[in-house]
Amino acid sequence: MGPLPRTLELFYDVLSPYSWLCFEVLCRYQKIWNIKLQLQPTLIAGIMKDSGNKPPALLPRKGQYLKSELSLLKHHFQVPIKFPKDFFSVIIDKGSLSAMRFLTAVNMETPEMLEKVSRELWMRVWSRDEDISEPQSILAAAEKAGLSAEQAQGLLGMISTAEVKKKLMEVTEVACKYGAFGLPVTVAHVDDQTHMLFGSDRMELLAYLLGEKWMGPVPPALNARL
């Protein structure tokens, strides 16, 4: 019997394109590395408020850089990222509170569907430039991910409950206690030690911490194109 898998927690928000990149890489490597991946839907607005950070795109030069960088990362990671046409309306004004509460409800009730529903919400906002704030768009994403209409409607009904609100707040607070100042954050639990890594470009360092082999964002053993 081999060693027990190391636990990785991924704190993410579908409003963050870099969270999507990190999410896809870890979902690919969970089939290769000896890890147990725990997806943790988190509210990036809460992280920003707690840490005093601000969205990088609010600084014009950073915003322009991010746009050009993401067009390169799209191909490097093989993730179909496309900048929303009205970035500030979609990302800054509308935000992701309803979507992240919905994912929290999914994680509480049908955790086996969390990966697929999360991916579909990213596809809507960061690939097809579709809304993720309105109830009907969340339902459409959930059903496309494989939930029945009845399941999706039931989970949507949970997002206004105290239980779901509390859970999302608690997970966000846990990320802050680990030291998060943005997302994504990957927390690796290795040999009774906890390592917090920020961003989608720390995967090589993560492999080093785990004693695993890093084979790039698209491991050759997998056909990872979405």
Image (spheres, helix red, strand yellow):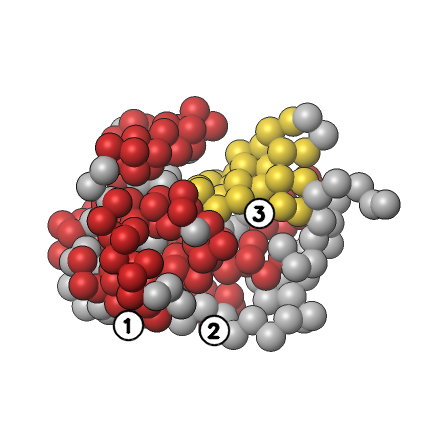
Dot 1 corresponds to which residue?
128
Q: Callout 2: helix, strand or loop?
A: loop
Q: Is residue 62 visible?
A: no
Dot 2 corresponds to which residue?
226
Q: Nearer the viewer, residue 189 or 2?
A: 2
The Cα–Cα distance between marks 2 and 3, rounded to whole angstroms, is 20 Å
| Circle number at residue 60 | none
Residue 67 appears in which quarter of the rendering? bottom left
Amino acid type indicated by mark 1: Arg
Residue 2 appears in which quarter of the rendering? top right
Query: Residue at 42% across / 28% down in the picture?
Result: 174
Amino acid type indicated by mark 2: Leu
Q: Callout 3: helix, strand or loop?
A: strand
Query: Residue at 60% across / 75% down in the picture?
Result: 223
First in sequence: mark 1 or mark 3? 3
Q: Nearer the viewer, residue 31 or 213?
A: 31
Note whether 151 is above or below 48 in the view shown: below
Query: Residue at 35% across / 34% down in the picture?
Result: 167
> How crowded is the residue under tag 3: few (<14 C-alpha within 10 Å), some, or many (20+)?
some
The Cα–Cα distance between marks 1 and 3, rounded to whole angstroms, is 27 Å
Amino acid type indicated by mark 3: Leu
1 and 2 marks in contact (CB < 8 Å):
no
Counting from the top left corner in percent of width and height, residue 80 is at 40, 71
Q: Nearer the viewer, residue 43 or 115?
A: 115
Note whether 203 is above or below 164 in the view shown: below
Dot 3 corresponds to which residue?
37
Q: Nearer the viewer, residue 219 or 55?
A: 219
Q: Is residue 78 left or right of residue 210?
A: left
Counting from the top left corner in percent of width and height, residue 107 is at 42, 46
Residue 5 appears in which quarter of the rendering? top right
1 and 3 marks in contact (CB < 8 Å):
no
Q: Nearer the viewer, mark 1 or mark 3?
A: 3
